[in-house]
Amino acid sequence: MQFVRFYWKQESVSAGTQAGKAKILRKVQYPKVLDIYEFCSDGLKKQLDAGRELERKEREIEDTRIKEEKAGQDVEMKDESEESKQTKKAVG
């Protein structure tokens, strides 16, 4: 797999440019995971299905775990106790 950062630029008479190599200067973001499943043959897809299903289930479990952790981190707001109110009055 090759991600191209250079290409051959054609000559343009109207713009007054010559043909030559050109570098793609704009920022390019590549995915962390490249899924080429749709380009595989039917036989290979059948072999890959079991692994893809296992990975999908693992991602669901991880997502559920993360949601539960975030829910447990929610802080509950409580009223000030009578003791802390009296301490503030005495100090203030």
Image (cartoon, rainbow, N blue to C red):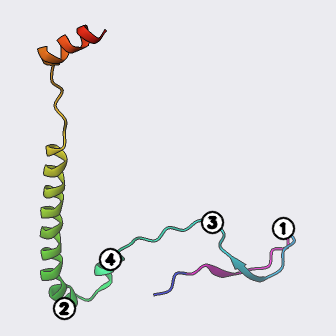
Residue shown at 12% from the left, 63% from the top = 61
Residue shown at 16% from the left, 89% from the top = 47
Residue denoted by label 3: 26
What span is in magenta? 4-15
Q: Secondary structure at mark 4?
A: loop
Whether residue 57 is situated above or below residue 85 in the rendered picture:
below
Q: Which mark is residue 35?
A: 4
Q: Secondary structure at mark 3?
A: loop
Residue shown at 32% from the left, 77% from the top = 35
> In whole angstroms, how far apart are the C-alphas of marks 4 and 3?
24 Å
Residue 87: x and y in percent read 21, 14
The earlier-in-sequence mark between 1 and 4 is 1
Residue denoted by label 1: 15
Q: Amino acid at mark 3?
A: Arg
> In whole angstroms, how far apart are the C-alphas of marks 2 and 1?
50 Å
Rendered image quadrant of residue 33: bottom left
For the C terminus, which image quadrant?
top left
The earlier-in-sequence mark between 3 and 2 is 3
The earlier-in-sequence mark between 3 and 1 is 1
